[in-house]
Image (tube, coloured by chain):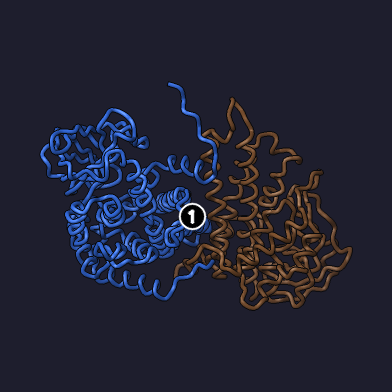
Chain colours: A brown, B blue
Amino acid sequence: MDFDFSEDQAAILSGLEQLISSLNIEAPKDAVFSAYSHALDAELTEGGFLDITQQEGFGLLDGALIVEQLARLPVSVEAATSVLIAPSFLEDTTRRPVAILQGALTKAARFLPMAKTLLADIGDDLLRIEIPEGAVEEVETLFAYPYGRLKNPEALPSVSLGAGRLVEFRRRWRIAIAVESAGLMQSALDQVLEHVKTRQQFGRPIGSFQAIQHRLVMAAELGQAVRWLGFKAAWSDDEGDAAIAATFAQDAIPRFCTDLHQFCGAMGLTLEFPLHHWTYRLRALLGELGGSSAQAIAAADAVWGASKNV
Amino acid sequence: MEFGWSPEQTAHRERVQTLLGRELPADWDDIAVHGPGSNAQTAFSKIFCKKLADEGLLISHWPKEYGGNDMTVWDQFIMGEELWAAGEPRGPQYMNVNWIGPVLMRYGNEAQKAEYFPPIASGSVVWCQGFSEPSAGSDLASLRTKADKVEGGYLVNGAKVWTSYAGLATHCFLLARTASAGKGAIVILLLDMTSPGVQVKQIPALIGEGDIHEVFFTDVFVPAENLLGEEGQAWEIITFALQNERIGIPRYAFSRRMLDRAAEKLKADGRFENPVVRDRAGRALALCEAARLMVYRVVHQRATKAPQDAYGNLARWAIIQADHAVNDFMTEFMPEGLLGEDQMQIAHHQRAIAAGIASGAAEIQLNLAARRYLDLPSEPRRGL
């Protein structure tokens, strides 16, 4: 049990920090909800960060550390799927970004506008679909990820990976939800802390009011718990751990986002104020894989076994 | 970063589990339902703690110079986790070894160590904590119990309230004040509970038999040699003591055990097929495991001797959420347990409803975390 980074982990994160610093990434100033950083994507690929889990001596937890750090940025980049999910399901991992979807192929999915591959959980099979140019229409959304929808899914050839792969696919997806949520929560909280320490009302910073302090501490606790649960799930790659981490994350997201916007008043509703870059990614993650109830049931089934009387 | 146990830690956990399997009597659950402060559990604690002492496990986390074995922080915690999950057969004596002893090691003089360590180390003594008063709960510094200086010692007058284990305690870690105001006037006295003028009255409560008491002090003489530390040093000592106390109880371990037990019961009678039940159970489970990792993070900090921050306050909040979630789950889906059908569920309920109150109110934890973890500005004191 060690909560500190190993030397290798610290070195990876230091390299990632240098890469991010070199790009001078800032929150988009315009009314852009789905700010995708192609420059960051290219640098991450070039730097080998996205195939970390396939490198000798590194594993899923090391990938999770990278995903969590990237989620803290005010722009989005498809990393969680490429790092934590795709290596098990893609023959050619260079065919990325990778979009993931559960349900009908006509549903909108994150990162589909720039995706080269789609992994689709259609309930009784896991499909791998290569996405050609022009096959996707963009979907306008408040969610701060680029969303798209296949124009004509029936026309696209798919490879059946089999229903037997769904357990692993969903487990990795749950880990990705938790780890990405942890990074998003940290930056959202940092943003709001800065606001409440400087914004004055009644002659003092609003962050000095106990009513606000207590809820911010609760938000901080949620963020920390998601972080450790997500990292532990990545470390163990265990069915129960993954479902528990995703349950906690999705359960926490509504009150976390509501409170953080509340403390920023009307300013938090503007596009100028960058909070939405994180909270509207969190809200997008809230509904993935069926939402918190689906994860909680999965956790109960994983830990306590068959739900039927045995 | 990694989340596994070493082979030695796994072996240590198995050793504790084996000991519990061997030493807990068949009617242990009937004893444990009354709570750590009950007559039954306190009496059993003297048998069980002696066994722990014989096994070299009661104070094994203490330094060798004090009779311990320099057990690692993690091994100490693993033992506490297993014992608390089992219903804490050390009864009130967990307090002796977790914080009374370590506080005496740090602040006690040689005579005090010689007097108080042997009975703690042999598992034959019960201490209580004389902190809260009718007008001094969370605002501990406003306590009023007086310790007037007299020849050879102090004369104590006043009252304590909510005092756990006082009914059977032989000693009290007592806070009192030598002057009317200020933290600097507080002293810590190591009081013999058989001293003339000490009167203990049990308070009937929702949380079980023998858990909370009023303690009255009428002209109780405490010899000067029973002063812990120096006059003016009490607040430093209390802060050190509370750091050990507040995260010392892995409450989530008992909640997780009860949740596992609830799931098995619900499965057995078919109610676990209901997805709503599994949904709620899964959420409670997530809160238990979140609390576990938050506490592990604090233990890691201690184990690596990293500077203490306010993470313990955050972890306390996580523990409270877990206790309440499991209690609420069982109350909603297994109300029959509180209708006399399950004494263990009643015992868990009684512990859970005190989770945010015992060992310092939850709101105080939030205050401390706001200032020390989030670095938020203090709320200005209201003018008088």
Q: Is residue B292 above or below residue B204?
A: below
In this orientation, which residue lies closer to the viewer: B339 or B201?
B201
Looking at the image, residue B297 sits to the left or right of residue A199; the answer is: left
Residue B58 visible here: no
Q: Is residue B126 above or below residue A197?
A: below
Point out the image quarter for the N terminus of chain B: bottom right
- Residue B128 x/y as whole percent: 24, 47
Q: Secondary structure at mark 1?
A: helix
Residue that extends furthest to the left in the rendered view of this protein: B196
Q: Quadrant of residue A120?
A: bottom right
Q: Is residue A119 above or below residue B237?
A: below
Q: Residue at position x 43%, y 52% from top?
A: B319
Crowd class of label 1 (few under 14; some 14 to 19; many from 20; radius 10 Å)? many
In this orientation, which residue lies closer to the viewer: B323 or B383?
B383
Q: Is residue A8 above or below residue B85?
A: below
**Mark 1 belongs to which subunit?**
B
Looking at the image, residue B266 sits to the left or right of residue B100; the answer is: right
- Residue A216 x/y as whole percent: 55, 42
Q: Residue at position x 23%, y 32% from top?
A: B146
- Residue A131 x/y as whole percent: 83, 68
Residue A270 visible here: yes
Point out the image quarter for the C terminus of chain B: top left
Q: Residue at position x 83%, y 55% from top?
A: A138
Q: Residue at position x 22%, y 62% from top?
A: B49
In this orientation, which residue lies closer to the viewer: A263 or B339?
A263
- Disc 1 target residue: B287
Residue that extends furthest to the top in the rendered view of this protein: B384
Residue that extends furthest to the right in the rendered view of this protein: A134
Q: Quadrant of residue A292?
A: bottom right
> Mark 1 is on which residue type?
Leu
Looking at the image, residue A62 sits to the left or right of residue B152; the answer is: right
- Residue A103 x/y as whole percent: 71, 63
